Image (cartoon, grey):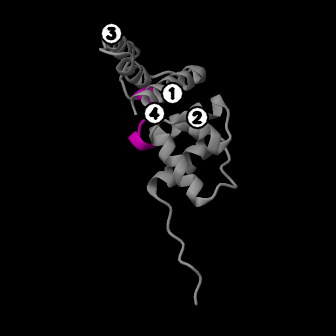
Amino acid sequence: MGEPELSSPSPEVDRLIEAASISSLSLDGLSEEDLQELAERVLLCDYSGVSEIAGVGARGLTRLVRSFHELVIKAPERRVLRSPDSRHLSKDILRLISENCLSNTSRNKVLSLLPTLNPGLILERQERLASALQIII
């Protein structure tokens, strides 16, 4: 009998490894299954799960997630919108929409989409969204 055939990593795992390299984070020691799970959690913005699997702090988590999504959209985060004025305008629009949501759950979902570089705020928003989803489910 031959050796079991190794599956090639998914594109998400490849992006995750590249994002970790860009972010100066080491994912050594993680199995292929852990890397796949980590990539899925990054895509879902499950920050507490990413932190738990990768064992990274808030700053490393922010760098990893930002780098991963920049690789997905193929543009630097700050260059998605053309000017600082358009970035401020988009934040104001999302803030106005979030203030007029029908429920706290929908407000938290909108707020989770707001861009931020504050790692504490990212984790806080993710925890609020996770707890809201648990209540709904």
Rounded to the nearest whole Å, what is the CA distance between mark 2 and mark 1? 8 Å
Q: Nearer the viewer, mark 3 or mark 4?
A: 3
Q: Earlier in the sequence, mark 3 or mark 4?
A: 4
Q: Main secondary structure of the magenta part?
A: helix
* Distance from Cα at disc 3 to Cα at disc 2: 28 Å
Question: Which x, y percent locates residue 104?
Answer: 39, 16
**Amino acid type for the residue under numbered disc 2:** Ser
57 or 99, nearer to the observer: 99
Which corner quadrant of the image does residue 82 belong to?
Answer: top left
Gap in angstroms between the C-alphas marked 3 and 1: 20 Å
Q: Is 85 drawn above or below residue 134 in the view shown?
A: above
Locate residue 115, reporting x and y percent. 45, 22
Q: CA distance from mark 4 to mark 1?
A: 22 Å
Nearest to the observer: residue 88 or residue 118: 118
Residue at horizontal 36 percent and vertical 24 percent from the top = 81
Disc 3 marks which residue?
Answer: 96
Q: Residues within 10 Å of mark 1 (few under 14, many from 20)?
A: many
Judging by the rendered image, the residue that carries numbered circle 2 is 48
Give x and y (percent) for residue 127: 53, 26
Say whether marks 4 and 2 touch (CB < 8 Å): no
Q: Are marks 2 and 1 in contact (CB under 8 Å)?
A: yes
Q: At label 3, which amino acid type do we have?
A: Leu
The span from disc 3 to disc 4 (Cα, nearest Å) is: 26 Å
Residue drawn at point x = 56 percent, y = 79 percent: 4
- Name the residue beneath numbered marker 4: 76
- Is 34 drawn above or below residue 45 in the view shown? below
